[in-house]
Image (cartoon, rainbow, N blue to C red):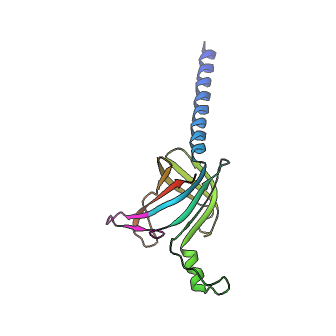
Amino acid sequence: MIQKKILWVALAVTLSIVFAVMVVSTEEEDLVGTYKLISDTRKNLDTGEVSYTFGEHPVGYIMYGKEGRMLVIVLNGDRPKPASFEKATPEQQAALFSSMLAYGGTYEFDGTKIEHHIDISWNEMRTGTTTIRYVRREGDKLIYTTAPVPFSDDVKSVTTLIWEKVK
């Protein structure tokens, strides 16, 4: 009798694990694809003021592969354009670097939260870190929200990024 109970408990635990893995796998499969950045706003939690992290018209794409890897690039919509590679001044080069972000790595998605485990980036300070975004869906759109964090200006803020699936 005890052996039958142990068998039933083992079966129940095994089925629970299989079901959980299937749900996570389905969520990740639903995420697979390329998304275009629609907006990127930052809300100051002290004042409620909304500003733009990458300008009013940011440009960007994020791609999620079925093998669990991702890539993202985001650019300020009104970046400077030097006359040529050879003639770009150090100031222009610095402006180009500071008006973008780009990184890649692996990802985990559970349907409400996505973790980007960064193994390559435009800024080595991000390489080896994990970025967490809270996600909600509206049709073909992914709406990412950050946890409240202080920015480089020490203002505690929440950033919201809206991505639309490319068809």
Residue 62: percent from left, percent from top: 58, 58
Left or right: 42 with respect to 58?
A: left
Residue 111: percent from left, percent from top: 52, 44
What residue is shown at x 59% (from left), y 68% (from top)? Answer: 125
Q: Is residue 132 above or below residue 55?
A: above
Q: Which residues are magenta?
A: 41-57
Rendered image quadrant of residue 3? top right
Q: Is residue 49 magenta?
A: yes
On the rendered image, what quadrant is the N terminus found in? top right
Q: Residue furthest front?
A: 167
Closer to us: 79 or 44? 79
What residue is shown at x 61% (from left), y 55% (from top)? Answer: 63
Q: Is residue 144 above or below residue 112?
A: below
What residue is shown at x 35% (from left), y 63% (from top)? Answer: 45
What residue is shown at x 43% (from left), y 63% (from top)? Answer: 41
Q: Is residue 75 above or below residue 131?
A: below
Residue 150: percent from left, percent from top: 43, 66
How many marks the image carries: the answer is: 0
Q: Is residue 155 magenta?
A: no
Q: Is residue 15 above or below residue 64?
A: above
Closer to us: 61 or 48? 61
Closer to us: 131 or 87? 87
Q: Residue furthest top?
A: 1
Residue 163: percent from left, percent from top: 51, 56
